[in-house]
Image: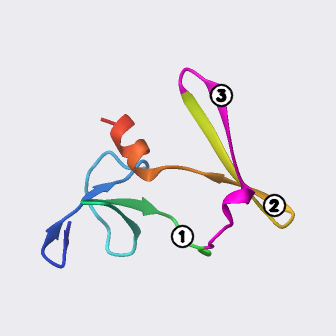
Amino acid sequence: MDLRGEAVAVFDSSSSSGDLQADRCILIIREESRSVGIIVDDVLNTVEVDESAVSTQEVGQGKKLTVVRLEAELLSVFDPLDIVENSK
């Protein structure tokens, strides 16, 4: 997709057609000089969390699970760039 003159790869895990729908939400993630878009169903909220609320554990085969405690909830955290890299 073209985002203000920058070509951004868009990843959609729910479709194999490659067609972008106008009514879809695309979450753009920027890290250093890379940008990637991930199609999501909805964005309910964004939050900033204190580093002390983040916990990471090994789950096997070199994979890690990261969770954040936010009040009474545990939220899964993912690295979108890692998801895209591993989908190739």
Give the number of marks. 3
Question: Mark 2 to mark 1: distance in Å?
Answer: 19 Å
Image-based side of 43 in relation to 19, left or right: right
Q: Is disc 3 surrounded by few (<14), some (14 to 19) or many (20+) residues within 10 Å?
A: few
Q: Amino acid at mark 1?
A: Asp
Mark 1 neighbour density, 10 Å: few (under 14) some (14–19) many (20 or more): few
**Residue 4 vs residue 18, the one in the foreground:** 4
Circle nearer the viewer, 2 or 1:
2
Above or below — where is 5 with respect to 74? Answer: below
Three-letter residue code for mark 3: Val
Residue 10 lies, with reference to residue 4, above or below; the image says: above
* Farthest left residue in view: 5
Residue 38 at x, y = what percent? Answer: 39, 59
Q: Residue at x 59, y 74 (%)?
A: 46
Q: At 68% from the left edge and 66% from the top edge, which residue is drawn?
A: 50
Q: Which mark is residue 73?
A: 2
What colouring style does the render use?
rainbow
